[in-house]
Amino acid sequence: MSGSAPNMAPALTQREVDTFVIDSREVRAGNVFFALSQPEYKNNGFNGDFEDSTKYVEAALRSGATACVLRPDRYKEHTSLEKYSDRLIFSDDVIASLQGLAHGVYKEWNGSVVAITGSAGKTTAKELTAEVLGFAGKKVLKNIKNYNNGLGHPLTVLNLAKDPGYDAAVLEMGMSTPLHEIERLCRITPPDVSVVLNVLPVHLEHLGSIENIAAAKAEIVAGMKPGGTAVLNFDDARVAQMADLSSGKVITFGFGDGANVTAANVVSKGFGMTEFTLSCPDGIANVRFHLSGRHNILNALAAAAVGTVFGISVEVIAGALANAAPPPQRGEVLRFRDGFVVLNDSYNSNPDALISMTQTLLEGSPKGSRKIVVAGEMLELGPDTERIHFETGRTLASLGIDELIGVRGNGESLVAGAVSAGIDSAQFATDSDAAAKMLVSMIKSGDAILVKGSRGVRTERVVDELLANFELEGEAAANVR
């Protein structure tokens, strides 16, 4: 970590520290607090205006922080901190110092890094990959939630300071700007295995074109360790082309002929159960998979491909996939005692993902059920966002859903598109709370419902309202919230 501590107390320089935080509310005795401010955010590719956390340094020190890292210019603005100068470390870029510290911890570790990116499915693929490696007996570190950016990534890696005994780290790498975010993450932890799931038209507002998105995703392959392995989606032409950037091996996954890891004989058994035959270079095995949809089978194939890189047998991989459960808000199946079922995929959305999940809804729904889609507006789609929403609404209607509730902003264009394509019932809700009230008032036994929306739309509130008004079936009731 770069920085200076001209007045640091000598005793503190000898103290071991293994926990590092950026939220002063999480500070405990012995931690080091990194005080972030707007210049660091701007320098490191974060959009928007952020709070200057220098004002929380004194509170962090009073809570027992061993030391705090902050900008020297911010220190000069906060004269009350002078009395704590023996516990302060100064850095011109606090985020860069956090990342540099993480890289130093990584270099002292002897495990393998599996890095995963894609426009959709990163978290599910991460969880499935960690399941495969863990099922095979490896101790696996993984980022929690969506800690996949220039802050969450180093904070995850710094867990290795506390426990260096992990065999592998499975890490999402996200991006949303043209500022080479993935390249920066790869410099912190050069991947031994780089996984690219897909390239879809998301973040167009900041990146401008799908070609730019592909180039940004490709940084994960270019940033691999020499001799590493690229795991690429054979079915996505833009991803498959990234094989040219690999300095090591390439293994592909997908449904297409020629992929190294494939699925055949796919049979949907309803929500939360899919059966398929997994084919890997060392053989085949039957899989009973508790996630629904073609997109989730692709995520499973990506995880299986990583397993083969680690020499795990197809039988063990199949067992791991059978043991896996969907992450929260990503294809969760919620069955209610009143006789309806909800597919909760409210974490994020884009046109391809919304259409894919709607197809999953239709494939898994019981015959004769009413199919309802609650779809929040999709963010960061660029200048054509209204047209994209309209066309996506037309597609949803053509698939054969019965009801559509479009939520917030361009959700109105979703509804307009669906109406133009002849849907019988479509309504617009100004926000997720209004959508929840609409759904609660219309719901009845036998309904099959998809809830999906971009993160900022907060469509999980729709699910929360259902949980507040209706009881879940059986064991699920004890496992939710």
Image (spheres, rainbow, N blue to C red):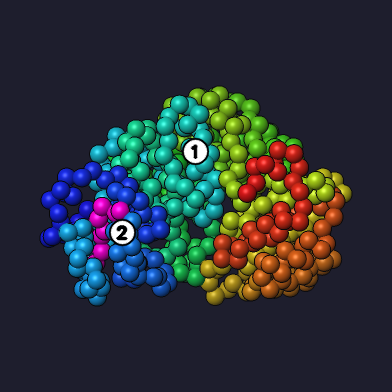
Query: Can you tell which mark lies on residue 62?
Result: 2
Q: Is residue 129 above or below residue 384?
A: above
Hey, what amino acid is under mark 1? Thr
- At a point 72% along the width and 56% down the height, the residue shown is 468
Instruction: In the rendered view, tell whether residue 227 sits above or below residue 67.
Output: above
Percent position of residue 215, x then y: 41, 58
- Label ID, residue 244: none
Please report contact status of discs 1 and 2: CB closer than 8 Å, yes or no: no
* Residue 305 horizontal side relative to residue 351, left or right: left
Q: Amino acid at mark 2?
A: Arg
Q: Residues within 10 Å of mark 1 (few under 14, many from 20)?
A: many
Mark 1 vs mark 2: give the one in front: 2
Tell me where the magenta segment starts and ends, as one range: 64-71
What secondary structure is found at the residue carrying circle 2? helix
Q: Position of residue 472 (x, y in %)?
A: 74, 46
Judging by the rendered image, the residue that carries numbered circle 1 is: 129
Image check: 464 left or right of 398? left
Q: Position of residue 118 (x, y in %)?
A: 49, 52
Q: Residues within 10 Å of mark 2 (few under 14, many from 20)?
A: some
Viewer-side residue, 352 vs 336: 336
Q: Quadrant of residue 58?
A: bottom left
Say which residue appears at 80% left-offset and 46% top-offset: 337
Indicate the position of residue 480 as horizontal and vertical percent values: 65, 46
Camera-side residue of 197 and 452: 452
The secondary structure type at the circle numbered 1 is helix
Residue 26 is one of the magenta-drawn residues: no
